[in-house]
Amino acid sequence: MSLQFRSMLAPPGPLIEQIAASDPTNPFRTAEYVSATEHLGAQTCLIGLWEGSEPVSGCFGFLTDSGLRRRLSIPSLPSIPNPQLFWKGLLQLCRKLKVWRLETNTYGSPAVEVPQLRGELNRRTRWEYTLDLTCANMLDGISSHHRRNITRAAQAGLRVHRTRSASGCAQHLELMRLSRMRRAGRGASVDAESGNERELALLASGSGEIFLAIRGEEVMSSGLVLRSRTGAYYQTAGNSPEGLKLGSSAFLTLQIAVILQQEGISLFNVGGSGADNPGLRRFKAGFGAREIELQAAAFCPRSVVERKVHGALRVGWRWIKTAAHFIGQNSSRQTGHSSSGRRALPDALVSAGTRNGEENRPCI
């Protein structure tokens, strides 16, 4: 029987569980992960290849926004036995759903290829690192550098605490903020800070759990780990300056692996890294993990004419928002008018003087 491309909006629970069971080591295909993403306002779309009534290869995409901002994001591409059929069907689905941006990611994916498609916006190569937790000794394959750090942290009395609480989430986000600041100080590119809604949704749904490495009452390192039936994924991590000195990050990673192993998890993905962070790649590979080269890409799956119109409209919209913001700032700075009918100068201008003879121009 030949394969068919199929998709379904708002798939029923049993079908979500069927997709999860087909890839039990992937935390991005669980009912809990779907629930967390829907809680944030996304609409779930089941995408895959079917043979008769049975899914052969499936994943979840999430629809967000509307109009010119409508996007379909696939967090974790599956293995694809018929790439031509899958990608042709996916592009047709995007046109049917009026999607302007298609994001194909490979978190927890096998070594799947993302082809060159029309309307490509960006592409990046990334690497992920997986630990086989069925081995007898977790220390096998760990680098000597990690061994020294793990020993130092253990001697300092670090212990591991697990939580899904809001307070634990706040501690984790603070350590992530400190880590971003350090990377930015070294000139590395960092993601913009966001709120805690996503982390809280992952924790509340049961998809995620936070692990903290603590000395006394102080958190040295933290990690958010996503779970599936037999797999786990190290989603995000953070470290304090003192924790880095103690080697708490390596200590926490090993302890998480040991705990997961004891709970029947067979595969622990310690996360990914891009080409711009070779130090992080060395850190993850230092646990004896298997390296998987992957790609991620984004596309505008519309015609050339539509893409040009879309680009012009987006530029125009950004210009209108910028102009409105500037006008709003000027209005808020007006402090009234003088008795001569001329507008009074803001305090900053009075002290700084005027520019180009225009007394009412903000001093920027």
Image (spheres, helix red, strand yellow):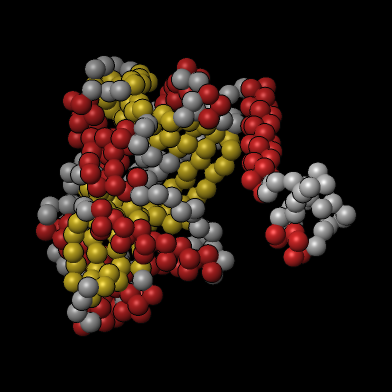
**Front position in the image: 302 or 23:** 302
Most extreme residue toward the right is: 357
The image quadrant of residue 238 is bottom left
Front-most of 335 and 225?
335
Residue 265 location, x and y as percent?
17, 52
State whether residue 67 appears in this view: yes
Quarter of the figure that contains the C terminus: bottom right
Give the position of the N terminus as an image quadrant: top left
Across and down, in percent, residue 2 comes to: 33, 18
Q: Residue at x 75, y 51 (%)?
A: 344
Q: Position of residue 122 (x, y in %)?
A: 57, 42
Q: Residue at x 21, y 52 (%)?
A: 164
Q: Residue at x 46, y 62 (%)?
A: 180
Q: State left or right for residue 351 relative to residue 132.
A: right
Image height of 50 relative to 293, above or below: above
Q: Is residue 276 left or right of residue 246?
A: right
User: Where is residue 182 shown, x and y percent of the image?
Assistant: 47, 69
Apparent side of residue 70 relative to residue 174 in the rendered image (left or right)? right
Numbered disc total: 0
Residue 267 visible somewhere in the drawing: no
The residue closer to the viewer here, 292 or 182, is 182
Question: Would you place residue 293 above or below residue 56 in this image?
Answer: below
Q: Is residue 328 above or below residue 179?
A: above
- Name the residue: 24% across, 68% down: 213
